[in-house]
C-alpha cells in the first residue's frame, strides 16, 4: 500500500481536510501504515497536481477540504484490482530485531519477549473488542464498515499470532543460558 492509495481510499468515503485525514489515517490505518502530518500534506499536494483529488471547499485560515475525483476513484479501484500492485513485504521491527537476539543478555531478552507478548496480546484484545462490537450490530452496516470489519479481523489475527510467537520465543531453551557473543 502506498500513502497515496490510503488517502484516496479515505477520500472515497467523503470530503475531508488535511487535518481530518491525518486524524482518520492515524485511527484507521496507523497501525498498518503510519504516516505523519507532513507526509500526508505533501501527498495531498501531489494528488491534487495529478488530478486525483480536488479542493471541495475552503474554510477559515485557509483550511481546505479535499474530495476524490473520478480519476482518483478509478486509480484506487485499479490499484485494488491490479495483482501486480500487491506488495507482500512485511516490515515488522520485532521480527527484524529477532535476528539479533543472540546479542542480548538472556535475562534482558526474556523480559523483552514478555513485554512484546503483553503488547501484542493487548493490541489483539483491542481489535477483538472492535470486532465483537461490529459482530453484534453496534456499527452501521455500510460497505466501508464491512471492509473495516475484515481489516480488524486481520489485525486481531496478526497481533494474536505475534503474541503467540513472543511467548513461544521466550520459552525456547536455546535462548536461555550463556551464549558466546561478539
Image (cartoon, rainbow, N blue to C red):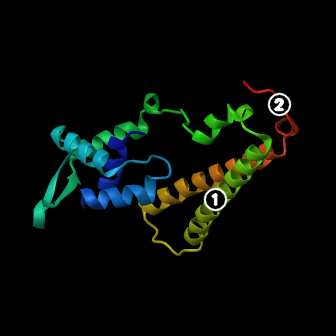
Locate residue 50 relative to residue 7 in the image: left or right.
left
Quadrant holding the C terminus: top right
Question: Is 76 left, or right, of 145 in this rendering?
Answer: left
- The answer to whether any part of residue 164 appears in the image is no
Residue 93: image x %, image y %? 58, 40
Choose between 106 and 29: the one closer to the eye. Answer: 106
Quick one: quadrant of the N terminus?
top left
Q: CA distance from mark 2 to mark 1?
A: 33 Å
Q: Quadrant of residue 129?
A: bottom right
Q: What is the quadrant of residue 176 in the picture?
A: top right
Q: Position of residue 65 (x, y in %)?
A: 19, 59
Residue sitting at x 46%, y 68%? 141
Residue 43, disc: none
Nearer-the-camera pick, 141 or 101:
101
Q: Residue 167: where, in percent of width, then height?
A: 77, 50
Q: Secondary structure at mark 1?
A: helix
User: Residue at point 69% right, 54% down?
Assistant: 115
**Image height of 58 relative to 116, above or below:** below
Query: Residue 132 appears in which quarter of the rendering?
Result: bottom right
Q: Is residue 147 above or below residue 32?
A: below
Identify which residue, 117 or 134, lies in the foreground: 117
Residue 26 shown left or right of residue 60 in the figure: right
Residue 179 is tagged as 2
Residue corresponding to mark 1: 124
Around disc 2, counting alpha carbons within 10 Å, would you say few (fewer than 14), some (14 to 19), or many (20 or more)? few
Q: Which callout, 2 or 1, points at the residue further toward the start of the chain?
A: 1
Residue 6 in the figure: left or right of residue 15: right
Dot 2: element: loop
Residue at the (32%, 49%) spot, across then down = 7
Which tag is nearer the camera, tag 2 or tag 1?
A: 2
Number of numbered discs overlaid on the protein picture: 2
Residue 105 in view = yes
Amino acid at each position: 500500500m502506498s500513502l497515496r492509495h490510503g488517502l484516496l481510499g479515505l477520500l472515497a468515503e467523503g470530503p475531508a481536510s488535511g487535518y481530518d485525514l491525518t486524524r482518520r489515517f492515524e485511527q484507521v490505518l496507523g497501525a498498518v501504515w503510519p504516516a505523519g502530518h507532513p507526509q500526508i500534506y505533501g501527498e495531498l499536494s501531489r494528488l491534487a497536481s495529478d488530478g486525483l483529488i480536488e479542493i471541495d471547499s475552503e474554510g477559515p485560515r485557509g483550511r481546505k477540504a479535499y474530495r476524490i475525483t473520478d480519476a482518483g476513484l478509478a486509480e484506487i479501484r485499479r490499484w485494488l484490482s491490479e495483482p501486480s500492485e500487491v506488495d507482500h513485504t512485511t516490515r515488522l521491527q520485532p521480527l527484524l530485531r529477532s535476528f539479533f537476539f543472540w546479542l542480548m543478555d538472556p535475562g534482558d531478552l526474556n523480559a523483552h519477549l514478555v513485554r512484546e507478548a503483553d503488547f501484542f496480546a493487548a493490541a489483539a484484545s483491542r481489535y477483538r473488542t472492535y470486532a465483537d462490537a461490529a459482530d453484534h450490530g453496534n456499527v452501521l452496516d455500510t460497505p466501508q464498515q464491512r471492509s473495516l470489519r475484515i481489516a480488524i479481523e486481520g489485525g486481531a489475527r496478526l497481533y494474536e499470532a505475534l503474541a503467540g510467537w513472543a511467548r513461544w520465543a521466550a520459552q525456547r531453551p536455546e535462548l536461555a543460558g550463556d551464549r558466546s557473543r561478539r
